[in-house]
Image (cartoon, rainbow, N blue to C red):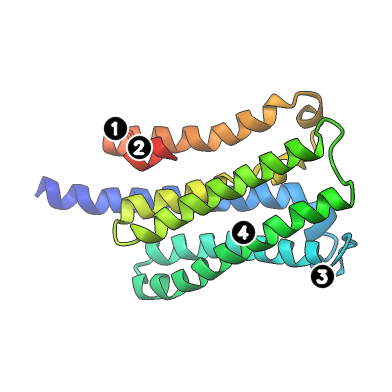
Amino acid sequence: MATLVARPLRMRTDDYFFTGMSLLILGTVFLGFAHTYYLAGTVHARLPNILVHIHGAIFSCWILLLIAQTTLVSVGKIGWHKRLGILGAVLACLMVVFGVLLIVDTIRRHHIPRSLTPGILLALDLGQLSVFSLLVAWGVRVRRQGAAHKRLMLLSTIAILFPAVGRWPFSFIRTFPPSLGLIIDGFLLCMIVFDLLTLRRIHRVTIWG
């Protein structure tokens, strides 16, 4: 009886946590791009070119899909979750392709932060996309292992939050650059604490991620 009660309780706890984290990520992205993109009318926003518009739309769709997928699992719509997973795989590929194109375009337009050189910007952004690609591919491969799959999808999205957090309208982001990494580490710390509370250990996927 204890086992039967504990299993649904853990499943509900997972649903609350991963849905909550996806909503937190949505808030993080909205806060970062609200002024220049979302509140500016998205398609009517004054962005440098069409490539930036396409990238913004694909990135936004990925975040919304993450929320949709965690919500579908929480309400037991696994069939819909699997069908949308195909769209997720396509979106992930598009994010990498247009992400690389945008990096090249950004360097070409000399739209680089003063603290970075083109080489460092290229290395950092390609590093983020590489981590994202690796974690998504791993997540697709273990899609039948629910605990690992959901952690990998969440970790892959956390890996590409740096541009959003870097655009938060708070002065400490610019005056204290390490705060950017510390905020991202906060997401990872939440996952570690969740694992310890629910599993009494850190899940191997969380460690690798």
Residue contact at pointers 1 and 4, CB within 8 angstroms: no
The kind of secondary structure element at disc 3 is: helix
* Horizontal side, residue 82 vs residue 33: left or right: left
* Horizontal side, residue 102 vs residue 17: left or right: right
Q: Residue at x 33, y 32 (%)?
A: 196
Gap in angstroms between the C-alphas marked 1 and 4: 33 Å
Q: Residue at x 37, y 54 (%)?
A: 149
- In the displayed structure, would residue 22 be above or below residue 188? below
**Disc number placed over residue 133 in the picture, else none:** none
Gap in angstroms between the C-alphas marked 1 and 3: 45 Å
**Disc number placed over residue 201 in the picture, else none:** 1
Give the mark nearest the N terminus, 4 or 3.
3
The kind of secondary structure element at disc 1 is: loop
Provide residue 115's location: percent of width, then percent of height.
82, 30
Provide residue 102's location: percent of width, then percent of height.
76, 57
Give the mark nearest the N terminus, 3 or 2.
3
Residue contact at pointers 3 and 2, CB within 8 angstroms: no
* Horizontal side, residue 99 vs residue 111: left or right: left
Residue receiving disc 2: 195
Residue contact at pointers 1 and 2, CB within 8 angstroms: yes
Residue contact at pointers 4 and 3, CB within 8 angstroms: no
Classify 10 Å Cα crowding around label 2: few (below 14), some (14-19), many (20 and above): some
Residue receiving disc 3: 43
Q: Nearer the viewer, residue 29 or 53?
A: 53
* Horizontal side, residue 164 vs residue 65: left or right: right
> What's under tag 4, amino acid-wise?
Val
